[in-house]
Image (spheres, rainbow, N blue to C red):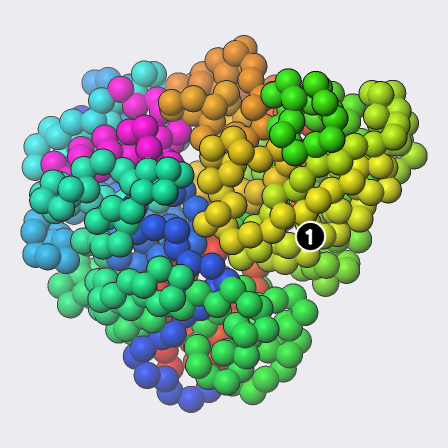
Amino acid sequence: MKLRTLLAAASATALIAGAASAETLRWARAGDALTLDPHAQNEGPTSALAHQIMEPLIMRDMTGAIVPVLATEWGPSEDNPNVWIFKLREGVSFHDGSEFDSEDVVFSLNRAMSTNSDYKELLASVTEVRAADKYTVEIETGGPNPIMPSNLTNMFMMDKTWAEANGAVEVQDYEGGETTFASLNANGTGPYTLVSREPDVRTVMTINENYWGASEFPMEVTELIYTPIQNAATRVAALLSGEVDFIQDVPVQDLQRVAGTDGLDVRTAPQNRVIFFGMNQGDTDLASDNVDGTNPLADVRVRRAMSLAINRDAIQQVVMRGQSEPAGMIAPPFVNGWTKEMDASSKTDLDAAKALMAEAGYGNGFSIQLDCPNDRYINDEAICQAAVGMLAQIGVTVNLDAKPKAQHFPLINNLETDFYMLGWGVPTYDSEYVFNFLVHTKGDKYGSWNGTRFTNPDLDMQIQALASETDLEKRDGMIADIWTVVQDQQLYIPIHHQVLNWGMKSNVGTIVAPDDAAKFKYFTLN
């Protein structure tokens, strides 16, 4: 069998200045991780915390490049094009001292494919995971899968024995409100071990003295104290006063204030994430509108009218203070399948929007509830408030209900919202990820974040076919065809691409990761 070895140097550019710091780094952001169960919630801050404690086979480093972690080599089998082979790193231990091997990988990937897992779409093409030997794992798919490694960058490995001993074999039913041992405890192979966990209050981690990569990475942060601070002013005040050393989400209104403070830096980069609104277009009637017996969002003319009413330039200038890029599709520019033409397609035209509303029979408008998070995305509630005023101009009266993400996300997953905000990052850098989660009919293996109720069996087949198409030029054509349907049907209302603004003490050495996942083993302190 022939394996292609992918090697990459650990990369973190140190931008260093200022006084020396303790080895403790106090980290804050608006919202906490939703859970410690590594397969329960595919959500940015949740994955960011998990990356400190647990590890995937491969991951994206701080630049976005794929690098080896628990696997050192991988590639398609010469004997069977449907099989990917992963050679595992030897001599790795979990935090409790137990050895990491292929049994743990087989267990973890099978667990990630189970019903409650929020990662199952990434493994939808997998037919079997097997251990060829103690340090070799084979992943077989229904056809040759050209991007399998990209699907694994946030797929965290668990200790099978630990999971069995602690009743953690099954994935936490997060949407059902379940709390499990794995949702509050963790035993990973990562650079930091969990000391204590108080959800929404404080999580403390300390350096893993037996970490396999201790000599490969700076590892200068020896203790991590993670504190979610939802209130923007309080979060900035904590950085300014020195109570915290690093915040991932400097509010746009405070950028100059932080950047102009001696001893503090703001570092900025485009994020691999787009913000948009979803609409329930599949139900025959809506629970939250004032129209009886019909669903105005089922009419594509209404959906287009609502998109035409949104002034993305005004949101960029007023709400985001220039820290966003208006979007016309629900994929960031990082992603294979993104085009400049589609991304520039969203326009503001109130006259055209009113005409479409009248043509659809809603010239007098209607009312509906908009569900919005208030601790997940940059200025999320303020964006929703702006949209309320914009939609009112075409007769759509919006009742805004903003709440923490822990209450907001289950509304989407449980199909309990008719109109909602969502943000989407694409860790695979490929459109298939967007389609599997957001466009495919919601079911056992696909569509877990598709709250639109949109369904198209023919399109589903086209999406599934992407997983086994190895002719990349043909595959790109298939992706373009699927995007044409998504755009023509106005499945979502794109708003903008986020820009990341990390605030930190000047002595903290790091670049800004496009996935917004700070991986502290790369950080330096000077």
Closer-to-camera residue (80/192): 192
For disc 1, the marked residue is 383
- Identity, as a three-letter code, of the amino acid under mark 1: Ile
Query: How far across and down, in percent of the image, does residue 408 sit?
Result: 52, 45
- For the N terminus, the image quarter is top left
In-image side of 257 versus 303 (left or right): left
Q: Where are the magenta residues, as a range?
A: 103-127
Quadrant of the rendered image containing residue 214: bottom left
Asked whether the viewer can see residue 74, the reply is no
Task: Identify the residue at the far top of this view.
Answer: 458
Quadrant of the rendered image containing residue 203: bottom left
- For the C terminus, the image quarter is bottom left
> How many marks can you see?
1
Q: Is residue 62 above or below residue 430?
A: below
Residue in the picture at 59% in, 78% down: 258
In-image side of 348 versus 493 (left or right): right
Residue in the picture at 35% in, 60% down: 199
Closer-to-camera residue (34/113): 34
Neighbourhood count class around disc 1 (C-alpha, 10 Å): few under 14, some 14–19, many 20 upward: many
Asked whether the viewer can see residue 309, the reply is yes
Residue in the picture at 42% in, 58% down: 32
Query: How far across and down, in percent of the image, does residue 508 sit?
Result: 42, 76
Callout 1 secondary element: helix
